[in-house]
Image (cartoon, rainbow, N blue to C red):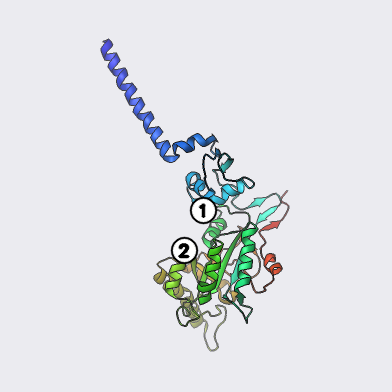
């Protein structure tokens, strides 16, 4: 009898040890052992963590938040802390303030609009290379974070928060200078941009970007959006064109440009820039029906989370002085909500 009890107790003990070992193994896979020792405190909302060795915000974001792109969350929570061995940092685990609302007002996101670049320019739509470099340097040195339109869409859909000083960089048309001049400067500051191209222009001359160049830029993290086929004014009915023919032409401009980009770049194109920034309600309805999720104008201003995603504001960068550039970087709208 005693032997039977002893054997049952032995089997139960072994089973419990196996289960406990399994839990330990799983938890160790989720958070490596040295990281568990480094955690001074953990709750559902945050982790207090002592850096045992060199850990960048990107590495910590991948480890604790599951997304290295969210490294800004850790950086913002530890503004005056150096990420070096022995430092104690706080890692927020829960999404907070998705709309950027505070008692003082709400967050807004500027979208900057460029066209072409050159060493020496003779048009307001052309920006000298050294001026563009100066502007990107200003963004980098003053704590602005360049985000993608995809990240902005998550903010507009109230799914994710954004860094406080977020800005989107967009470049229209598809000039070769985007590849030759703008891209090296953007890489210098580790920035990405959204390119809006009109498909009739791609590869037609030495001044136009090619599909291979677009593929290369997309591979490095750039987004490619539509700008119609021929860069026509979507709100303007041609002379002698009846309403039915006009609507058919506009739908073709929007649908075919999307289909061409989808096929050439193997993607689902959901971003659009209205040529000349012009649209009306019938154009907006058509964009929605065709599957576009974001469309941008050239109406100056920044965008709160409650903005219409298909009618976003965007500031053209035409002047070359740094003061004018800074005036386009509004990231917060003051409004007392108390």
Q: Residue furthest bottom?
A: 240
Q: Which x, y percent locates residue 306? A: 61, 58
Q: Which x, y percent locates residue 53? A: 51, 42
> Which residue is denoted by mark 1 in the rendering?
69
Using the rendered image of the protein, determine whether residue 322 is visible from the camera's viewpoint: yes
Q: Secondary structure at mark 2?
A: loop
Q: CA distance from mark 2 to mark 1?
A: 15 Å
Label number found at residue 193: none
Earlier in the chain: of badge 2 and badge 1, it is 1
> Which residue is denoted by mark 2 in the rendering?
220
Q: Nearer the viewer, residue 207 or 11?
A: 207
Residue displayed at 55% across by 88% down: 239
Which image quarter holds the N terminus? Answer: top left
Using the rendered image of the protein, determine whether residue 316 is visible from the camera's viewpoint: no
Q: Is residue 31 left or right of residue 118?
A: left
In the displayed structure, would residue 57 be above or below residue 205? Answer: above
In the displayed structure, would residue 73 be above or below residue 328? Answer: above
Q: Residues within 10 Å of mark 2 (few under 14, many from 20)?
A: few
Q: Nearer the viewer, mark 2 or mark 1?
A: 2
Q: Nearer the viewer, residue 298 or 235?
A: 298
Q: Residues within 10 Å of mark 1 (few under 14, many from 20)?
A: some
Check whether the beta carbons of the residues at disc 2 and disc 1 lie within 8 A of each other. no
Counting labels gives: 2
Q: Secondary structure at mark 1?
A: helix
In the displayed structure, would residue 91 be above or below residue 296? Answer: above
In the displayed structure, would residue 69 be above or below residue 91? Answer: below
Q: Which x, y percent locates residue 155? A: 56, 56
Picture quadrant of residue 7: top left
Q: Is residue 58 left or right of residue 112?
A: left
Q: Which x, y percent locates residue 150? A: 51, 60
Q: Is residue 34 left or right of residue 103?
A: left
């Amino acid at each position: 009898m005693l032997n039977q009890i002893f054997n049952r107790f032995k089997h139960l003990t072994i089973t419990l040890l196996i289960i406990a070992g399994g839990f330990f193994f799983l938890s160790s896979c989720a958070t490596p052992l040295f990281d568990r020792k480094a955690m001074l405190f953990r709750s559902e909302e945050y982790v207090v963590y002592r850096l045992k060795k060199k850990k960048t915000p990107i590495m910590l974001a991948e480890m604790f938040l599951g997304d290295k792109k969210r490294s800004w969350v850790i950086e913002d929570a530890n503004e005056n802390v150096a990420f070096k061995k022995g430092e104690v940092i706080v890692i927020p685990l829960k999404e907070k303030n998705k709309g950027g609302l505070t008692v003082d007002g709400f967050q807004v996101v500027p979208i900057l609009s460029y066209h072409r670049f050159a060493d020496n320019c003779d048009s307001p739509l052309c920006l000298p290379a050294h001026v563009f470099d100066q502007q990107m340097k200003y963004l980098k040195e003053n704590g602005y974070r360049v985000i993608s339109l995809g990240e902005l869409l998550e903010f507009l859909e109230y799914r994710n928060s954004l860094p406080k000083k977020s800005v989107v960089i967009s470049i229209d048309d598809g000039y070769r200078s985007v590849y030759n001049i703008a891209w090296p400067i953007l890489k210098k500051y580790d920035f990405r941009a959204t390119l809006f191209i009109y498909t009739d222009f791609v590869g037609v001359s030495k001044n136009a970007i090619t599909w291979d160049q677009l593929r290369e830029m997309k591979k490095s993290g750039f987004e490619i959006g539509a700008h119609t086929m021929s860069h026509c004014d979507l709100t303007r009915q041609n002379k002698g064109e009846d309403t039915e023919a006009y609507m058919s032409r506009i739908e073709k401009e929007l649908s075919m440009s999307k289909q061409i980009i989808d096929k050439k770049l193997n993607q689902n194109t959901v971003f659009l820039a209205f040529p000349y920034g012009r649209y009306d309600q019938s154009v907006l309805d058509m964009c929605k029906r065709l599957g576009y999720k974001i469309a941008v104008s050239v109406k100056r201003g920044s965008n709160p989370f409650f903005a219409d995603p298909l009618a976003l504001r965007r500031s053209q960068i035409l002047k070359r002085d740094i003061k004018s550039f800074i005036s386009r970087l509004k990231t917060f709208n003051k409004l007392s909500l108390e």
